[in-house]
Amino acid sequence: MTNKPVIRVRQVVKEYDGVPVLERLNLDVSAGTLCTIVGASGCGKSTFLRMLLSQEVPTRGIIELDGSPLPKEPTPDRGIVFQRYSVFPHLTVEDNLLLAREFAGAPFAGRFFGSARRKARDAVSQIIGDIGLDAARRKYPAQLSGGMQQRLAIAQALLKEPKVLLLDEPFGALDPGIRADMHVLLLDLWKKTNMTIFMVTHDINEAFKLGTRMLVFDKIRHDPQAPGAYGATITYDLKLDSKNRQDAQEAKSLIASGVFGA
Amino acid sequence: MRLINRKPSRRTAVFLGVLPFIFVAILYMVASDIRLSQNPSDRLLPSMSTMLESMRQMAAVPDKRNGELLLWKDTLASLYRLAMGLGLSTVLALVIGLVMGILPYGRAALAPFTSAFSLIPPITVLPILFILLGLGEAAKVGLIVVGTAPVMIRTLAQASLDIPRELVIKAETLGASSWQIATRVIMPNVLPVLISALRIGLIPAWIFLVSAEAIASTEGLGYRIFLVRRYMAMDIILPYVAWITLLAFIMDRLLLSLSKLAFRWKHIEGDSL
């Protein structure tokens, strides 16, 4: 088995109204990587994730998924969990999970009736149990806690078995205790599916704890005459697998030196 | 305690709420009494009993000319026109509003026209409608549509644009088509807004209904008010205005209840969690 990259990024630049936000991005990420992305606010880490999702298009350069250029719009081969608005507020827990099947199975009506619906409900009841929402199956997202909502969002994002799962600060709004539970859930899912995961976070410890690879985005070139002249890029690319402990050492010294700001 | 932190109990709140109504009623009755004691045949401020009697005649005594109960005939005619007009506006708002809100091409094609159209003073369209559609029901319903649809369309379009983009993207990653996103994600999320738009649209709808009925009609609440104005029949006009107000209030409450019943998820936030 060759280690062909799932995601290949070449010379990507992203500009808004001529002002570069990201520049000189080059990256190969192999299958099964849990890649965490950190950086100061406004350094473009979320923009990078949105480009991986095709929510935004690079101004220049190319991003490839499994060897072919990314589609021009979001598709089921990339799942997404946002910090907020990740689940559908007008649907119950169960209907949120049924939706993907209904999209696939009912092109016009977009919903199942009768026996088709019963069958689909049976199929998702396993998932509802796995994420511990059995008792909340008929509840609306607004009736759930933040942690429950994000568990639902992750389960929903995995329904189409995407090649790449994108997480945009998924646990940023959660309490520390709940966040630790979510880490366990995420690592568990990742080990089971061997999926490639990109996770943007502003919590550096979370990035170290979960990632097998960590990317640090930062702005390194500054022109005092033109503060907007240069964008951010990947300044550190650390492999964090357990065999390679010197990386962890290097990483710890990075925290100590305070490159990440607050 | 500061005044801003003092809250009335439920009973006090109800009492305070009723107070202005009672005040106006008493004010009216005193003024009416003074005028009637000076001139028993005064028509401007009829007594409560005169108004009740007149309304009883309108509601329960068959009209001498055609044997109909005028209040109910008027009410039915007006409500029918209102329902037709607002129903058409609702359909237009849902279809055009969603097309404008969801599809960039639809927005490009329809938004400027809708904006321009909504600036036409609807009442100026009334003569055109009378000429084109005749003096029948179509012109009156048409005026209500012209008066309410543009604003409702724009409200719906804006509401579909205001839906968090994340929801649409999530649906895309779940494999939804444009049609499925429109029908299963965006439409259910804007339906509660449609109800609000309808509640707000009730106000101009009544205005245009009464205007159209006043100008050319043979029945209807607005028609009756303007008909009896010739005889200065305040004993009919005042109760009719109160009746129209009551009808408008009931419709507003019914729509609110419908929203709470049909879109429970929309009314959860703030209450529980």
Image (cartoon, rainbow, N blue to C red):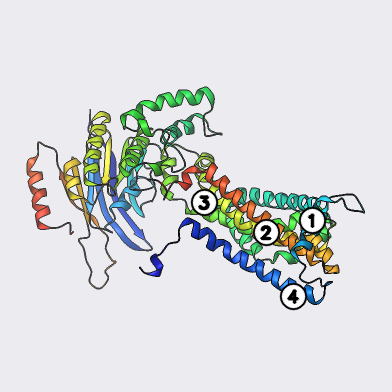
Between circles 1 and 2, the one closer to the viewer is 2
Which sits earlier in the primary sequence, circle 2 or circle 3? 3
Q: Which label sits in the foreground, 3 or 4?
A: 4
Which tag is nearer the camera, tag 2 or tag 3? 2
Residue B34's tag is: 4
- Whether residue A68 is visible to the viewer of this picture, yes or no, is no
Chain bearing mark 3: B
Give the spatial CA distance, label 3 vs label 1: 37 Å
- Residue occupied by mark 2: B245
Camera-nearest residue between A245 and B78: B78
Q: On the image, numbered disc 1 is attached to which residue?
A: B220
Determine whether B120 is above or below B188 in the image.
Answer: below
Element assignment for label 2: helix
Q: Which comes sooner in the sequence, label 3 or label 4?
A: 4
**Dot 4 amino acid type:** Ile
- Callout 4 environment at 10 Å: few (<14), some (14 to 19), or many (20+)? few
Question: Hey, what amino acid is under mark 1?
Answer: Gly
Which quadrant is the N terminus of chain A positioned in?
Answer: top left
